[in-house]
Image (cartoon, helix red, strand yellow):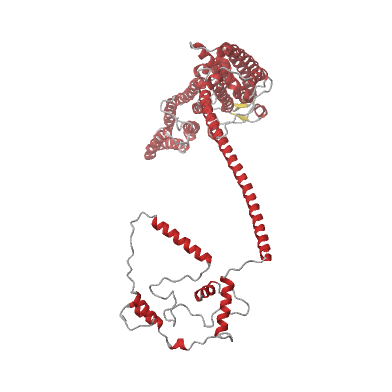
Amino acid sequence: MWLDRLAGQSSSPSSSQPGSRAYSPAPRRTPSGLGPYITSQQRPGVTPRSSSLSLASTESSASSFLASSRRANGSTLKESRTVYTGPEPIEILNKLLRDDGKDETSATTADIKSASSIIPEDLQLEFDFGELSLRELALSEESEVDAVGVYRPQAAQEYERDKAKFEDLHRSIRACDEVLSSVEINLTSFRNDLATVSADIETLQARSTALSVRLENRKAVEKGLGPVVEEISVSPTIVSKIADGHIDESWVKIVAEIDRRATAYKKSSASAHGSKGLEDLGPLLEKLVLKAIERIRDFLVAQIKALRSPHINAQIIQQQNFLKFRDLYSFLHKHHDTLADEICLAYMNTMRWYYANQFTRYENALRKIKLHSLDKTDVLGNEDTSRKGTVLSSSKIAGPPHDAFNLGRRIDLLRTTNQSALSSYLAEEDQSTHYLEVPFRNFNLALIDNATAEYTFLASFFSPALSYSTISRHFTYIFEPTFQQGHTMTKTLISDTYDAIGILLAVRLNQHFQFELQRRKVPSADGYLNGTAMLLWPRLQFVMNAHCESVRALTTALPTRPPTSKTEQGKLSAAPHVCTQRFGQLLQGILALSTEAGDDEPVITSLRRLRSEMEAFLTRYSVAFGNDKRKRERFLYNNYSLILTIISDTTGKLAEEEQEHFEGLKTAFQEAT
């Protein structure tokens, strides 16, 4: 009975009847081995008793004990017996009876003794019974234990109340069951949908794999059949463009495409493996080629006719209407060479007429330029040189004075950076007087520029259809009358002149034109310049010989003996002779124009001959001083010194030789004086 009460009190310490105490009047103490009382949990060797003695705990303990027994009995281990090794029961009883006179040496007995001993602190504890006696305190706890641990039947109201609770619980469980059933249905449907989607994905993967294989196969087939199909097919757009489209850059590209397919068709037709597609394509390609040839012919003929229009610039038409469509002539020459040759001939005849007409007009304009006239009186040995001015034609008018032997600023034509020819309008309006090298330079400069432009055009437009040798022959055919016209003008300029400086300037200009053509890589005009050089050099030799003859004649005219009369001897002077001044200026001009001359040029031989004649003249002239050797040598010194002074600013190999020669003569007569 006490155990049940203690168990009921310990199992529900929080519940109590009204007017009863649910807790011990003694203050709470933590379980310890130092307490004054020994509980079941503190007894050594004894298993502690559970704090709850209710029916549920008993049943659970029994069931767990049975389960553990079944698990132990059903184990595969060997059956074993436990041997008790704890203290003897008599010892335990003695300890309970507080018989602490034995076995003080063991650790367990010492612990129990220390736990059961009463210390002074335990005697000082004060118990509060809440103004209740010990009997009232015991009865209040017993009623509490009975209220908690003893079963009593339920009343009708409590039953109805519990019934309503269980019905509500039942309805809640059914509602949860329905919700869970709906969730189960949804999950089942979702699982079925997932299965369907998975099947669809597998189907799509299979189809994708099949399509990839088909795509690769088609690419392989297209790679093999694509070029073949391209060769045997022509789109309607190409046909329409060839027949009716405007001729522009896109039209040229389509013609190139037709040419490529026509070439492939001919190559395939020549082979033994011809296809039906190529046989069907052949007539269409032939018609397209013929139509393209017809339109190319009409286009080129129209451009050639435009070249014959008055006041037209041929180079503009060549750049804008010919060179942009140069592939058309190659196509025409490839598929109809006879027609291409006829168009080429028509172009050559047109340009032949064009250049001949243009340069005839230009020559007429240059003829209106006034020129200084230097005839046979303008030689070194002529005492009375007249000054004349004339135009290039036969009519003569008085002109400003000129110096036939002084180079002056005439060399600027070689040094100028202006490489443009004088226009026809400016030539007609020019009122100043010039030397022969001015019209020579302007005519040949214009001719060289046009020849360069035409040769470049021919090489660009007709190549590679025509070889460069054929293009050179066509160039010569076009410029043949113009070159003849240039030679005729050169002959007219130099035929009657004795201007050695002007002729030598023309020679240097002609050499400059030759170097320029080599730089521009126009070899076809070399023949014209070589012919011009063949006209200039003989005339220069002739003029130099005329100077030599005039000096020789002057030497021959001198007396062989000195004058006898004092009057004539008084007229003699040691000052330089006028011919020396002319010779020095002429020599300086020739040396300035021959700074880069070679040793084999004809002008060097002529110059040395003239120098010898001049030295002979001065030596013969010095005889007039008679026995006055000092005055005679002074005269020679002054003349050679003047010549050396005039040519001292010239450079070049030939100039150095002449300076050294006259320096030696000057030094020889200086020592004598």
Residue at 42% x, 81% y is: 34
* Residue 452 horizontal/vertical position (percent): 55, 25
Q: Is residue 230 left or right of residue 670?
A: right
* Residue 224 horizontal/vertical position (percent): 50, 22
Task: Pick the residue in front: 602 or 48.
Answer: 48
* Residue 449 horizontal/vertical position (percent): 57, 26
* Residue 301 horizontal/vertical position (percent): 64, 16
Vertical arrangement, residue 518 with respect to residue 127, above or below: above
Vertical arrangement, residue 2 with respect to residue 546, above or below: below
Q: Is residue 92 left or right of residue 319?
A: left
Residue at 51% x, 87% y is: 126
Q: Quarter of the image containing the C terminus?
A: top left
Q: Quadrant of residue 349?
A: top right
Q: Is residue 366 visible?
A: no
Task: Pick the residue in front: 435 or 21.
Answer: 21
How many numbered marks, from 0 up?
A: 0
Task: Pick the residue in front: 345 or 273.
Answer: 273
Task: Pick the residue in front: 286 or 334.
Answer: 286
Q: Is residue 429 visible?
A: yes
